[in-house]
Structures are given as structure tokens and as C-alpha cells.
Amino acid sequence: MASSSLICETRIWKDLRAHVEDIKETHLRELMSDTERCKSMMVEFDGILLDYSRQRANLDTLNKLYNLAEAAHLKEKIRRMFNGERINSTENRPVLHIALRAPRDSVINSDGKNVIPDVWQVLDKIRDFSERVRSGTWVGATGKVLKDVIAIGIGGSFLGPLFVHTALQTDPEAIEFAQGRQLRFLANVDPIDVARNIAGLNPETTLVVVVSKTFTTAETMLNARTLREWISAALGPQAVAKHMVAVSTNLTLVEKFGIDPNNAFAFWDWVGGRYSVCSAVGVLPLSLQYGFLVVEKFLKGASSIDQHFYSAPFEKNLPVLLGLLSVWNVSFLGYPARAILPYSQALEKFAPHIQQVSMESNGKGVSIDGVPLPYETGEIDFGEPGTNGQHSFYQLIHQGRVIPCDFIGVVKSQKPVYLKGEMVSNHDELMSNFFAQPDALAYGKTAEQLLNENVPQPLIPHKTFSGNRPSLSLLLPSLNAYSIGQLLAIYEHRIAVEGFVWGINSFDQWGVELGKSLATQVRKQLHASRKKGEPVEGFNFSTTTMLTRYLEESADVPKEDCTILPKM
């Protein structure tokens, strides 16, 4: 299937380009008046309802997008991913995060070997370990129960688990299992993040989970060494083995660090960091907090979407529809951004996680064959929960730039409130906005309507809303471990669909590496200047000036080799 030809060279791509002019002539007010069209643009699966009728598209658009998917060999690429073929060609790896949540009796092969037994061996190990810690069978160095967990990781080792943790914190079932426990995430190498994470915690009751595939990630390992010192200073170096565990594949460095290799939990090269929340990266800290049974429901929700993605026809396939509509918005209508707007405070960390999954996956400038792309790929993702976002950036969305929006709503609140004498409940008030905002974006408000409302003429230009701004809505029945897994998998596969159609590799991230290598040069310079008084050399004028200023104004840092831990 390898070919240097680009999807933009196909007849169907050019056909879609021409079709844009037809769509530009039609306002969403007109499209929304076609009931049959709207009815055909609602799809339901496993309790989730997708309404994409407020996209700037008609049935002809959808048929052309299905043809584009065929031209891009989308079905074949999905099949190759599920079959464990090495579709991450630049790193020569399969892409099998779907295997992390597959049922125990599944068969998913990589290089002729079924990986599912290995996956479940790790899951069973996590179940056993987390139950021992939670029950008090496994205790700390002084015999106290370990009720507090700090997970150290960055990027995909942090954002995904944090999103799930935040969403579960107010789920009634999860709350019951988390009684008396707390989970924190240390990601930033900034010492402020260390100080905030250890504030109020006792090393005697704290378990640290170090998440690093290679056990060499600079920020993660410096934070790990910092917390190792925090534990050792309070309890002695021998306590590390009882208070620190690892999620890693590098057992040699794990043991050298002072962690018992038996307390290392594996994952595999076919798991990309940003797709790793369903591996030990997320499952271990989440199981320690909520118990394995709750986390297993999360895995089952994701697996449900995996099977739907693999088998459902495109016109009923949630991730495929979402992915094709994103390609339409980015590459044809020219909208570079996407707002992710969950009307649930529990999903406050969803947009930051998807921002990473999406922008790290599809922020590419060349095809999978290394050919420079003459079209844009990827989206600028951002978002906040409603109604907070409405009082922040919705002004731009309504009357400034056109930014396609994803509205995510939940039928039943995790924490309902009812006040006597109020017209609606708090959740109904929230959902009133969820239903109203997409229509406000689609329909807008005309000068004629404003005149009829007796708005003064000078204010009419300021109060006019052009409308015709696309959005889609996802409605979930409730927000629990299962539906959180569903939501994650929908977006993971949506991003893959975009990459498959664009013809890029959504599963490597070479752009992350350049900054790391340059930071190494700076690190060496800072050490040489601090410890030996050497001048700043080998950098351009700008960097030299900034580094020199930084060194001069932070000359009060300790010169001797000593340990000082942050205090809150």
C-alpha cells in the first residue's frame, strides 16, 4: 500500500474542493430547516447520541466524504491497525492501544504472537497489587497503610490518567471506593509542582508511582529523584523499595534507581504515550485510588467503542463520522481550530488531554512516505467546560473567527442539586445552555430581527450575529467509568481517522525531540557556569544574553552540592 501519491491528487479530493462553493451558498438556517436531513445526521450507539446536523454539510457532502475515505483506503488502514501491522512506519511499530482494553479471550496479534495474554498478565498484577495496598496487606516502611499516591509522569503519562481521575472524582460509585484515599499527579519539573504535590502528605503513608517507559525521561526522572530524596530523608534509603513502584520496560534502570523490579509494571513499544491511559500508565494509579473493578469498567467502555469503530458501517460509525467531518472542516472549509466544550465540570481535563492526543498525533507537515504536504493537517484544539467557557472565549466563537465546536452533554448529573422555588435545577440550567449554544452559533441573529426588536440603529452592527458556525453535539446518558472509556476511545479513533485520510503518521512525534536535544546543551552550560564559573558560549546572541541575565540574577543559588526540598 506504500505510495508517494497524496490524497489531494485524487479526483474525489478535487471534487470536494469544488463542492465547497455549493456549501458556501447555503446558510445553516436553510440546512436546519430540512427535517429529513437533520434526522439522517443523528446516530446512536451504546447509549451515546451524536447530532452533527449543525455541520456545514448536506447529504451530498457526506457521500463525497465517504468516497474520500474509500480513496484513502480507510477501511484497510483500520484493519491493518487492528491486525497489529507496523503502521507506525517511522518507528517500525504496531499501534495496538486497542489491545490494552480488549476482553481476556480476544486474539490480537503482533508479529504472529497474541498480545492479549501479556496485557492481562499485567492487568492481573495491577489488580493484585492495588488490592494489597488498598486492603493494608502491603504497608509502608513504618507499618502504616499507604493511602496517598503520587504518580510521576509527563505528557501521555499524565494528561490521560488525570482526565480519567478528575472525571471519576465525583462519580458516586468511584467515590465510595476512594474513601480515605487521594491521588495526585506530578508532571512539571518546576519545583512548584513538587511542592504542591507533597504539601500536606506524610512520606509514611505515601506511595510514589514513577511512570517512564525507558526510565530516562529527563523531567520525570528528576522529579522521581526528588521524591526519592523526600522519602529517604524522612524514612531512610531502605524505605524506597516500600514506597516507590514503577511503570516501565527498563528493569535494569528501575533496579538501579532503588525500586524492586518485581514492583515494575510493564507496557509495550506498540503503546504510544498519549494512547497509554488504558495501560499500566493509567490503570495502576487509578486502581490504587478507585479499585480495579471501577477501572475495568472504564476499559470495557473503551473496548465497546473499539469494536464499533472496527465493524460499524461508516454512516453509523461515530469515530469515522467525527474524523471525516474534521477533515472537511480543516482541509476544505479552512477552519484550523476546534473547541471541545464539555457541559460537565467533571470533564474539565478532557480538552487538555485531547489537545495532546490530537496535536501531537496530527501536527505533521509530511506524508507517511515523507512527501511535503500541500494542505494543512491537524487542528488547534482547546476548550473549557460550559458554562465557564461562555464567559471566556465564546465571544470570539460567536462574532469573531469561525471555530467548529464539539458540545458534550450528560443527561444525568453525577451530583444533582434541587432548590425549592427555582424554575429549573442546576443541571437543567447547565443543559439549557448546552442545547441553546449550538443553535445560537448556527442561526445567529439578523439585522432585520434586531430592527423588529427596536434595537437602536447604531447598535445593530454590534448585536448582529452572522450564524452559519458549525458544531456537533454528543449526548451521554451519564458520566461514569464506562462512559468515560467510551468518550476517550471515540476521540482516539477520530484522530486516527483524520490521520489515515490525510495520509500522515499519527503515531510518531519527532517534533517533540528537537527541543529536548537543545535543552541538553543548555543544561550542560548551566552546570558549567554554576559550578565552574565558565562564561556562556556556543549560543546565538539572543540566547547568550538571556542565559547570562538568568545566571547573574540567580547567583544566590547554593554553590555547594546539597539537598534542599521545597516547603509549602
Image (cartoon, helix red, strand yellow):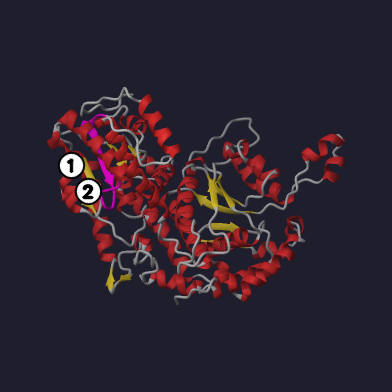
Q: Quadrant of residue 23?
A: bottom right
Dot 1: within a 10 Å radius of its alpha carbon, few (fewer than 14), some, or many (20 or more) residues?
Answer: some
Quadrant of the frame with the N terminus: bottom left
User: Where is mark 2, residue-wise?
Assistant: 129
In the drawing, does residue 235 fall left or right of residue 470? left
216 part of magenta stretch: yes
Q: Where 76 sits versus 273, above or below?
A: below
Please name the residue shown 39% across and 41% down the image: 539
Image quadrant for the C terminus?
top left
The Cα atoms of the two marked residues, 2 and 1, are separated by: 8 Å
Left or right of residue 158: residue 464? right
Residue sticking out furthest to the left? 238
Report if residue 150 is visible in the image.
Answer: no
Are the residues tagged 2 and 1 within 8 Å (C-beta)? yes
> At 28% from the left edge and 35% from the top edge, which residue is drawn?
527
543 lies above or below 406: above
* Percent of width and height locating residue 276: 36, 54
Q: Amino acid at mark 2?
A: Phe
> What is the quadrant of residue 93 in the picture?
bottom left
The residue singled out by tag 1 in the image is 138
Residue 47 position in % (x across, y down):
52, 57
Using the image as rendered, state which of residue 426 and residue 196 is in the foreground: 196
Identity, as a three-letter code, of the amino acid under mark 1:
Trp
Q: Position of residue 390 (x, y in %)?
A: 62, 39
Magenta residues span 202-217
